[in-house]
């Protein structure tokens, strides 16, 4: 049986909050690594999985705008696609700056 303190430590290690991961990323902390997802969706070239201490953190990083998004494989990729299409300001900016080939 775990003590309450040990239990809280295990939970915080496995399910770090977005703010804590953001701080580690902004400090270029060695605990953070990025992994390319090998999935078949066309959205994956725009994202990297975020690992903390070599364990997937349930977060992905948008390569275009550096937004940190909570994501699990069971969520699918529709939310990630929506981010790129609607929320990602760099993606929208690039689309708006394209020269019309008419």
Image (cartoon, rainbow, N blue to C red):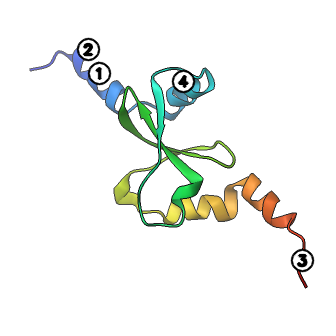
Q: Residues within 10 Å of mark 3 (few under 14, many from 20)?
A: few
Q: Position of residue 18 (x, y in %)?
A: 51, 34
Q: Residues within 10 Å of mark 1 (few under 14, many from 20)?
A: few
Q: At 63% from the left edge and 43% from the top edge, which residue is drawn?
A: 67
Q: At 58% from the left edge and 23% from the top edge, which residue is drawn?
A: 28
> Looking at the image, do the residues carrying marks 1 and 2 touch, with CB atoms under 8 Å apart?
yes
Quarter of image, res 51: top left
> Looking at the image, do the residues carrying marks 4 and 2 touch, with CB atoms under 8 Å apart?
no
Depth check: give the residue in front, 18 or 42: 42
For the residues labelled 3 and 4, the Cα–Cα distance comes to: 41 Å
Disc marking residue 100: 3
Q: Earlier in the sequence, mark 3 or mark 4?
A: 4
Query: Is 9 left or right of 67, judged from the image as shown?
Result: left
Find disc 2 in the rendering and name its residue. 5
Q: Residues within 10 Å of mark 4 (few under 14, many from 20)?
A: some
Q: What SS does tag 4 mark?
A: helix
**Placement of the C terminus among the 4 image quadrants:** bottom right
Q: Earlier in the sequence, mark 4 or mark 1?
A: 1
Q: What SS does tag 2 mark?
A: helix
**Placement of the N terminus among the 4 image quadrants:** top left
For the residues labelled 2 and 3, the Cα–Cα distance comes to: 60 Å
Q: Position of residue 101 (x, y in %)?
A: 88, 80
Give the label, 4 or 2, closer to the camera: 4
Looking at this rendering, what residue extends furthest in the bottom direction? 102
Find disc 4 in the rendering and name its residue. 24
Find disc 1 in the rendering and name its residue. 8
Depth check: give the residue in front, 65 or 99: 99
């Amino acid at each position: 049986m775990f003590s309450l303190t040990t239990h809280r430590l295990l939970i915080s290690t496995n399910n770090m909050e977005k703010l804590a991961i953001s701080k580690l990323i902004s400090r270029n902390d060695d605990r953070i690594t990025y992994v390319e997802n090998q999935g078949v969706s066309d959205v994956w070239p725009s994202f990297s999985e975020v690992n903390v201490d070599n364990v997937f953190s349930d977060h992905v990083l948008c390569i275009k705008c550096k937004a940190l998004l909570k994501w699990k494989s069971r969520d699918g990729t529709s939310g990630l696609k929506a981010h790129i299409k609607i929320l990602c300001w760099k993606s929208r900016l690039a689309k708006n700056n394209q020269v019309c080939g008419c």
